[in-house]
Image (spheres, rainbow, N blue to C red):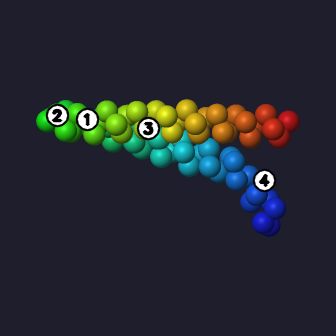
Amino acid sequence: MNSKLDENKQMLYGLVLFVLGLILVFISRNDTGSYFQNFIIGMFMGLGVGMVIVGIVLIFLYIFKKK
């Protein structure tokens, strides 16, 4: 059981990063307000997009490694 988890760990990390990145992107879609709110929204958007990209890369690496 543990070896199967170790084999799929990269896929799991990729999916978790992808989902968390999407959540951050959707949170950052709020209306703007003060300068501080704009900064936080921009930071969430940047982190979310970065997490989605890293998640996609991890998933593709897992798929190509399996073949």
Q: Nearer the viewer, residue 30 or 40?
A: 40
Under mark 4, the amino acid is Glu
* SS state under label 1: helix
> What residue is pinned by disc 1?
39
> What residue is pinned by disc 4?
7
> What residue is pinned by disc 2?
35
Query: Which one is earlier in the sequence, the residue at label 3 or at label 1?
Result: 1
Asked if residue 58 lies left or right of residue 62, the reply is left
Quarter occupied by residue 61: top right
Under mark 3, the amino acid is Gly
Residue sitting at x 36%, y 39%:
44
Q: Are marks 1 and 2 in contact (CB under 8 Å)?
A: yes
* SS state under label 2: helix
Under mark 2, the amino acid is Tyr
Residue sitting at x 79%, y 59%:
4
Label 3 crowd (10 A; few <14 / some 14-19 / many >=20): many
Residue sitting at x 14%, y 36%:
34
Considering every residue shown, the one lying at the far right of the view is 67
* SS state under label 4: helix
Tally of numbered tags:
4
Camera-nearest label, 3 or 1: 1
Please say whether residue 31 is visible from this viewpoint.
no
Camera-nearest label, 2 or 4: 2
> What residue is pinned by disc 3?
48
Q: Nearer the viewer, residue 62 or 42?
A: 42
Camera-nearest label, 3 or 2: 2
Q: Name the quadrant of the N terminus.
A: bottom right
Query: Which one is earlier in the sequence, the residue at label 3 or at label 2?
Result: 2
Residue sitting at x 67%, y 39%:
59
Please say whether residue 9 is visible from this viewpoint.
yes
Query: Which one is earlier in the sequence, the residue at label 3 or at label 4?
Result: 4
